Amino acid sequence: MISRAFSIQWCLLVLLLCCCSFDGFSSFQQFIVKGKVSDASGGLPSVSVKLKGTSTTTSTDVNGNYSITIPNGSGTLVFSSVGFAVQEIPVADRSTINVTLVTEDKTLSEIVVVGYGTQKKSDITGSIVSINEKSLREVPVANLSQALQGRGSGIDIQKGSGNSKPGTAPVIRIRGARSIGADNDPLFVVDGIPYNGNINDINPDDVVSVEVLKDASSTAIYGSRGANGVILVTTKRGKEGAPVVTYSGYAGVTKNLGKIDVMDGKQFEMLKRWAVVNGNFDKNNKPIFTGIDDPKILTSGIFSAEELDGIASGRSTDWQDLIYKNGIKTNHQVGVSGGTEKTQYSVSGDILMKRAFIPDKLMNDIV
């Protein structure tokens, strides 16, 4: 009787151990889900794939393929990537799940890389001014500085020291002057290389886009040289394919905006007559001349010999009419671009001739 009871106990113990082992084995089972993440153009790399509510995550490879191991066939996978709408898909015991992401237009929430890290685009829209190629082509201009005028707040462009001579480098200030004695010019960076030349030497037809960095973050990238702001210029690149020849040109007439309103000969004569009458007295504080018609005024030396001759002949000359003439401006630009899979090229030449409304002001520029 004791032996039989002992055997029953052993049987129950073995059965209990088997049940525990089976439960433990089932609890350590793993479920593998594979698939591909793509958009309208093909596979998407670096897409985050995460099991919702856990820290289990992976990402897609360069072809958009992924593989993630989860505890069982339940749960929900979350697919996310910058610029695409987040998708949540239940696993439902499926070992293969392919996903197509849809683009999401939330430009103000996109991440923009700045000098010291990343920020939301909505937080720095006042610090960066972007000018695309279409905006640069709206009005024909002789140089890049003219293309930047009026394109963004905080960008002040003036003629250098008031000099209207063609080809004179402009004065550019971003958010005003920062120093009394030091240089206040911004830093120009053309295709990633600091440019120390004249901005007028950059052919505006070769420019694809211009970015103006007004924020202090520009100093994190370019150091003290970026303290006055940075202007990033991106030029055209060659594309794979047959050579493409382009030409653009224009011609126009330039003239002064207006003349200074000056006195004619008779008005100038009367001005000097009144000045002499009202400004000359003897020792007794009495006027020397009886009035503006006093003939002694003409012999008192107030008028020069040329002025007396002009008064006698009634001659009146506006020297502005003799100085200002209509100027002319022409520009011709030819470019060739193309390339193969390994090498692309883009070559262009530009000839600019600008004659100002002052005849001796002439500029011929070949770029």
Image: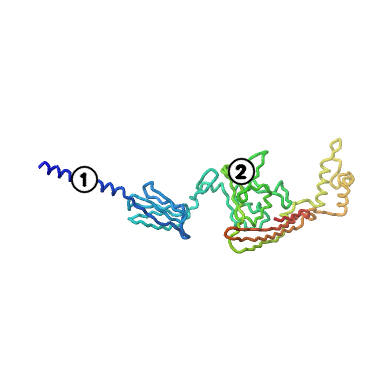
Q: Is residue 242 above or below residue 187?
A: below
Q: Is residue 161 above or below residue 38?
A: above
- Percent x, y of residue 15: 20, 47
Horizontal placement of 13 versus 310: left or right? left
Specify the farthest residue to the left: 1
Instruction: Identify which amino acid the numbered label 2 is placed on.
Output: Gly
Q: Which mark is residue 354?
A: none
Query: In front of the other: label 2 or label 1?
Result: 1
- Percent x, y of residue 120: 50, 47
Secondary-structure class at tag 2: helix
For mark 1, what is the residue?
Answer: 16
Q: If you read the primary sequence from the N terminus, does the residue marked by circle 2 or circle 1 appear first?
A: 1
The quarter in which the C terminus is drawn is bottom right
Specify the farthest residue to the top: 283
Front-lying residue, 113 or 143: 113
Secondary-structure class at tag 1: helix
Q: Residue at x 86, y 37 (%)?
A: 282
Q: Residue at x 86, y 43 (%)?
A: 289
Specify the farthest residue to the front: 3
Instruction: Identify which amino acid the numbered label 1 is placed on.
Output: Leu
Front-lying residue, 244 or 148: 244
Q: Which mark is residue 226?
A: 2
Front-lying residue, 345 or 351: 345
Q: Quadrant of residue 178?
A: top right
The quarter in which the N terminus is drawn is top left
Q: CA distance from mark 2 to mark 1?
A: 76 Å
Horizontal placement of 353 versus 121: left or right? right
Q: Callout 1 environment at 10 Å: few (<14), some (14 to 19), or many (20+)?
A: few
